[in-house]
Image (tube, rainbow, N blue to C red):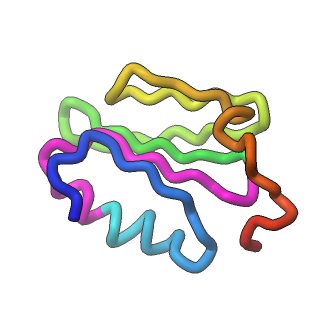
Amino acid sequence: NVINPLIIVEVLFNSTQAYERGDKFKFYRSLPTFQEYILIEQSSYSVERYYKQKDDQWLIDFCTGENAVLQLLSVDWQISFQDLYQRVNFDLAET
């Protein structure tokens, strides 16, 4: 169980990505401390970052490309996609 998360990071699988973006995200948004949701594609250099605004509206950013950098807003942290995907073999990733 998740209790009082600020940020949740998940890797997307083809078989579950609709659930991750839909009902699961809807549940997470009901958690009062939850501020940021990161969804990482496993088969390409692509990350979706959802973040909560002060008016409780959610915005989304799409980060793509091998040279991109993921910067989190809820915590002071960033990572380059080269580091994030360092050990990923895209040929073996789920298609």
Is the residue 83 above or below the residue 10 in the image? above
Most distant residue in the right direction: 91
Residue placed furthest toward the top: 76
Q: Is residue 37 magenta?
A: yes
Q: Quadrant of the N terminus?
A: bottom left
Question: What residue is shown at x 60% (from left), y 69% (from top)?
Answer: 13
Q: Quadrant of residue 28?
A: bottom left
> x, y (%) of residue 77?
45, 23
* Residue 88 as seen in the image, left or right of residue 25: right
Number of marks present in the image shown? 0
Position of residue 83 measured from the top left corner of the image (x, y, whole percent): 68, 33
User: Looking at the image, which residue sits at the far left?
Assistant: 32
82 over 7 or under it: above or below = above
Question: What x and y, as percent, mark residue 52?
Answer: 29, 38
Q: Among all residues in the image, which is located at the extreme front?
A: 87
Residue at screen point 33% across, 72% down: 23
Q: Is-magenta flag for residue 61? A: no
Q: Name the residue nearer the viewer: 3 or 54.
A: 3
Which residues make up the magenta segment?
Answer: 26-44
48 to the left or right of 89: left
* Residue at figure coordinates x 69%, y 30% from the top left: 68
> In the rendered image of this protein, does residue 15 appear above or below residue 32?
below
Q: Quadrant of residue 82?
A: top right
Image position, residue 39 (x, y; %): 51, 52
Quadrant, the C terminus: bottom right
Q: Please report the residue visible at 44 percent of the width from the left and 66 percent of the height from the top.
A: 20
